[in-house]
Image (cartoon, rainbow, N blue to C red):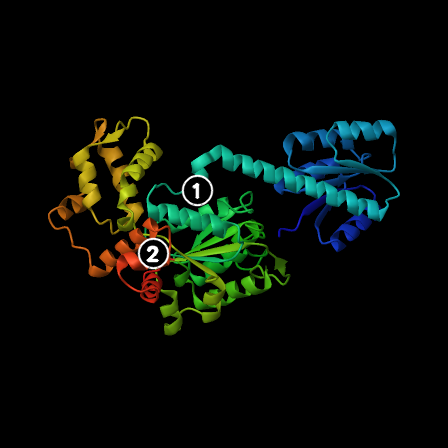
Amino acid sequence: MTVASLLVVEDEHIARENLTHVLTNEGYKVSAVISAEEALQELGKKHHELVITDLMLPGIDGITMLERIRAQHPATEIIVVTGHASVQNAVQAMQKGAHSYIEKPLNLDELRLQVSKALERQALSQEVLRLKRIVAKGNNDFPFVGQSDAFAKLKKTVRQLAQMNCNVLIQGETGTGKELVAQGIHQLSQRSEERFMAINCGTFTAELMDKELFGHEKEAFTGANRGQKGILEVADGGTVFFDEIGELALNMQVKLLRVLQERTFLRVGGTKEIPVDIRVVAATNRNLSELVEQGTFRQDLYYRLNVVTLQAPPLREHHEDIPILIGHFLEKHRQPGQTITSIAQDTLDMLMRYPFPGNVRELENIVQRALALGQGAIFTPDLLPKDVCNAQTDTPLATLEDVEKTHIRKVLAASGENKTQAARILGIDRVSLWRKIKRYNLE
């Protein structure tokens, strides 16, 4: 669970230190400033669930600050604390949107109670907003497009995993949309209001990956004129997606394992442990268990990441989604001056026969190419790349394994995932079906 972030605004040194000490001991992340101007600047840089402020402040007064916070940061709750208590001040603060009003000298039990109540209201408000967004987005709450059985099964699994808050390993061929699956897990989770950060492990050297992930302190290396947060720190409370995790260097695997175990890390050049609350989703098009046997991937990290494995299906296993995907990509990528709005039947027939070795990403590129080259309103066959046209006269036959895998999937779907009934239809015993399901990753 994400730790709540509180901002204390108090110009009296002792009172500020006492509030910070008490609230930190309660387990909250606490920042403290001495003026309304500093508070507004801090809120502009970082989200705080709750502000606890004195009313009598130097410069901008507490009531004016309260009005600005309500206007600029409506999701932030406010508790007013002052030694200049009066019914008038209390009423005015509440009218401007304060959650509650506490007089000095502080009663610590009352403070703890009001903070708890304010955070409960803040959390409830955020959950209501999140659910409203999901309802408002309807079928678009998941970034994949499709209506096939394979897509429906994938979407159902993602919805279940989203609520589990565990690490997830996504396996699949290049171009199957593994990052979109990761985004779907994030969007449907309780972390959806926080950041989703993605990093491709195959595009960075170990040194650059170190800086990207963990950030660095000032003067940690030549040219480091200031400190810099890394991806883990920026994504605190959210989700970090490690694409092509099998390409991660061994020394970085050790550091990532430590983050997963300890939930803390060190910036490059730093000595202070920084706590972090993230969900990790990793993806690969390689067989990690084989990499473990080869000694290029740590077994302990593999087990940490592989809490739940999800398979992103190749496009050849849900060809029936091609027409709806084409429509989606036409709408998504059409620019001013590009005229294509529909696809000719013979073009669609050729695409339906194509095996798509590059999967959904390849289809998206084909649509973008047609939009760029097309002059009329229809996506005609002459706009298809040579690979698609050449494949029409030399379409490879499916392997027996592919045929069996596809047929088992269809029978399972038709039987409502009833394995006893499916085994009976297939003419095999239940144990044999179970082995084939495991072999083809059909669970």
Placement of 343 over or under 120, stated as above or below: above
Left or right of 155 on screen, residue 56: right
Quadrant for the C terminus in the image: bottom left
Task: Give how far apart the Cα atoms at labels 1 and 2 are.
Answer: 31 Å
Q: In the rendered image, which quarter is residue 220 located in?
A: bottom right
Residue at position x 36%, y 53% in the image:
312
Please tell me how crowded label 1 is: few (under 14), some (14-19), or many (20+) other residues with Cα within 10 Å.
many
Q: Amino acid at mark 1?
A: Phe
Q: Which residue is mark 2?
A: 421
- Residue 224 in view here: no
User: Between 154 and 281, which is closer to the camera in this rendering?
Assistant: 154
Residue at position x 54%, y 57% in the image:
214
Q: Secondary structure at mark 2?
A: helix
Q: Which residue is mark 1?
A: 142
Q: Earlier in the sequence, mark 1 or mark 2?
A: 1
- Residue 343 in view here: yes
Badge number at residue 211: none
User: Between 164 and 104, which is closer to the camera in this rendering?
Assistant: 164
